[in-house]
Image (cartoon, helix red, strand yellow):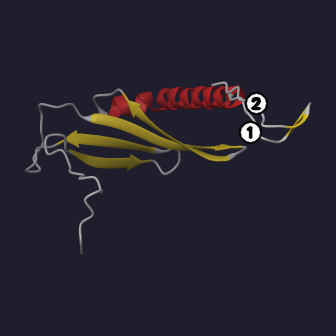
Amino acid sequence: MATDPNLPDIQLDANGLYREEVFTDRKAGTLRRLVPIKSDGSDDPARDVLWSGQTQLLTPGGVLPLVFEIDAKTMDEALAKFADSVKNALEQAIDEAREYRREAASRIVVPEAGGLGPMGPGPGGKLKLP
């Protein structure tokens, strides 16, 4: 098989590896614990364990998946912060949707050259607004 020189060379960072562990209650969502490891697979105590959460919310538009980081050191702390982290992630998703809607509404559509204007057929306007 020939290698395409235009394809990106993707490699894992041997100094940034994590072992992922997934915990779920099969109702509200999941917790993910990312344990830092060395390239030989042993734990790397020099780096912090990372926590993230995942859940799904049913909206009028369908299911909204939420994935978010949880600032915690232990499982108990991650469990205690799960609900607030969901609320923060939902607020952020709503803010991003509003911003996207504002940006879409502010776009100005400029007709292409040609067409029928108030003075009859013509070359169309040259004015282009951002």
Q: Is residue 58 left or right of residue 90?
A: right
Q: Amino acid at mark 2?
A: Gly
First along the sequence among labels 1 and 2: 1
The reply to whether dot 1 and dot 2 touch (C-beta < 8 Å) is yes
Residue nearest the observer in this picture, 69 or 100 = 100
Q: Is residue 65 left or right of residue 44?
A: right
Residue drawn at (10%, 48%) of the image: 39
Asked where in the image residue 99 lies, by quadrant, the reply is: top right
Q: Residues within 10 Å of mark 2 (few under 14, many from 20)?
A: few
Q: Residue furthest bottom?
A: 1
Q: Which mark is residue 125?
A: 2
Looking at the rendering, in which quadrant would you find the N terminus?
bottom left
Residue drawn at (45%, 32%) of the image: 82
Give the image location of residue 130, x and y in percent. Answer: 63, 25
Q: Residues within 10 Å of mark 1 (few under 14, many from 20)?
A: few
Q: Which mark is residue 79?
A: none
Residue nearest the observer in this picture, 87 or 75 = 87
Residue nearest the observer in this picture, 113 or 67 = 113
Q: Is residue 36 left or right of residue 104?
A: left
Q: How many marks?
A: 2
Q: Amino acid at mark 1?
A: Ala
Give the image location of residue 24, x and y in percent. Answer: 42, 48
Kind of element beneath mark 2: loop
Give the image location of residue 108, x and y in percent. Answer: 71, 29
Above or below, 74 relative to 61: above
Label 1 and label 2: CA atoms lie apart by: 6 Å
Q: Which mark is residue 113?
A: 1
Give the image location of residue 32, x and y in percent. Answer: 35, 43
